[in-house]
Amino acid sequence: MSVLSRAAAPPAASEVAAAVAALLTNLDTTAPAVLGAPAASGPADDPRLGIAAAAHSPRRLLGPSGLGAPSLAIDLPNPRAIAELAGQASRPPSPVGGAMPIRHRPPSSAGAPTGPGAARRFANGPTGIGTASASRPGGIPVRSAPVTSAPPRGEIGATRPGTSGSAIPTLYCPPPVRDDPALAATVNAGIIAWAERIGLYEGRLEELHRADFGRLIMLAHPDCDDADRLLAVAKCAVSEWSVDDYYCEEDASDLAPDGSRSSPEAELGPRLELAAAAMDPVHLPPRYQVRVEQAMQADPILRAFRTSFEHLSHFATPAQVARLRSEIAGWFIALGAEAGWRQAGRMPPVWEYLLNRQPHSFLPCMAPIDAVGGYELPAAEYTDPRVRRVVTTAALAAQMVNDLYSMAREDLSNGREFNLPTVLAAEENCSRRAAVQATAEVHDELVHRFEAEAGLLAASGSPQLRRFLTGLWSWMGGNRAWHADSRRYRDDS
């Protein structure tokens, strides 16, 4: 079962979106005492946040609630402190001794007080104003889950194959909002039928089925119960994943689009250029357009992008489709940069790696959150620099989850793949275990930043922005849950 307790998880309901929105609009929900007191040292003691003085007073809770929430300790700074710290975060850090500055992670529930208060139960659904409607259909209330110290598979106590004994630490991350295995299975079946029809992952459909991308999409978009709408965005996500699996792997084809012999490294750019044309059709003179169409029909990746965008256009506006194209274009540029490191045999420094991983992240998967939810975030808000900072923070945090869980898979790539633990270990000359811990701390710092800044934006933004921000929050939680459970990243079942 890994991360989720499927029996206790609420099924999807039309009220979910409003319930999730309460997480970002209600900043006054108090956290149970079972979450424990702040740590005695580190940033948690920052006098600007008033943490030490408020150690025995109720703390405000923004976001993490539901399945697995007892393992998260949350201290939300007051708005003035948030603004001050956000200003500092936008300035270049001052490394000490050349080491990358890493914030301390919040205390875990292992240090929670014992006694009568420690036996309190945590609701496994969203908390706060407006969440009373988030109940099971038929008026059956959401059940509470007992606080447990047992770590889920893939985290503390669980060692990933090929990671030299390095366990993945518990991450400061939202829990998934809903779990609907039947809906996930429906979406996954649709993915397999589509892939078989267009020839994608031919001979590897069982591998695709085991990865269970339908479950990822179900977990990441809890405000949508429409299987066809979820399938549309799932096709886009699988198309994006297939670029890595087909174009960037060691055994990528050495044939150029015109059929001549070349090399995978030399042809990555031309292949990505064709993929861009599959999403944003070119309009050439007819005698040349025929050749373009022949190239599109000859490559399953190009067929995947073309058909997935066509399906998404049934639900997304032209502006939303253009937004997704733009995010994918940025990702293509980052893929080219990574290929450059590989071809030169160069290990990038941490700053360059993280710069690359901002567009080379889950930005394309997060871009259509509103299209899946059935609304549209205005372009003026999506492109606002403050919103852009929050969106890219969420995407980079989600990518750090992928870096941690994909290490075992990437360790088998003969040095072709890059992830933050590998880059950190090279730059800091530290052990894999220390690099894994440092990566978890980078992830946690990003989630804290998202939590603080999204709260301020939600208080002043449009209803569509509030809903999009909660969609990002839900996406991060669903992404982590899927990574911890997907057989794409483990071989123990």
Image (cartoon, rainbow, N blue to C red):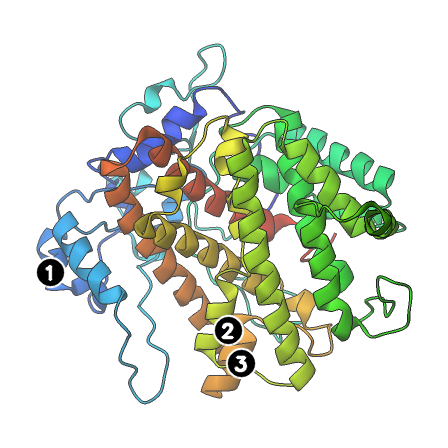
Question: What residue would you read off at disc 1?
Answer: 48
Q: Amino acid at mark 1?
A: Arg
Indicate whether 347 appears above or below 254.
below
Indicate whether 78 appears above or below 66.
below
Question: What residue would you read off at disc 2?
Answer: 353
- Cα–Cα gap, marks 3 and 1: 36 Å
Q: Residues within 10 Å of mark 3 (few under 14, many from 20)?
A: some
- Cα–Cα gap, marks 3 and 2: 6 Å
Q: Earlier in the sequence, mark 3 or mark 2?
A: 3
Q: Amino acid at mark 3?
A: Pro
The reply to whether residue 109 is visible in this rendering is no
Residue contact between numbered discs 3 and 1, judged by CB atoms under 8 Å? no
Of residue 3 and residue 397, the one placed in the foreground of this image is 397
- As helix, strand or loop, the secondary structure at mark 3 comes to loop
Residue contact between numbered discs 3 and 2, judged by CB atoms under 8 Å? yes
Q: Residue at x 88, y 63 (%)?
A: 258
- Cα–Cα gap, marks 1 and 2: 32 Å
Q: Nearer the viewer, mark 1 or mark 2?
A: 2
Question: What residue would you read off at disc 3?
Answer: 348
Q: Residue at x 69, y 81 (%)?
A: 343
Q: Residue at x 14, y 57 (%)?
A: 49
Left or right: residue 224 compared with residue 17? right
| Image mark count | 3
Residue 279 x/y as whole percent: 67, 46
Q: Amino acid at mark 2?
A: Tyr
- As helix, strand or loop, the secondary structure at mark 1 comes to helix
The image quadrant of residue 416 is bottom right
The reply to whether residue 279 is visible in this rendering is yes
Q: Residues within 10 Å of mark 2 (few under 14, many from 20)?
A: many
Residue 474 x/y as whole percent: 45, 40
Of residue 377 and residue 258, the one placed in the foreground of this image is 258
Residue 325 x/y as whole percent: 58, 47
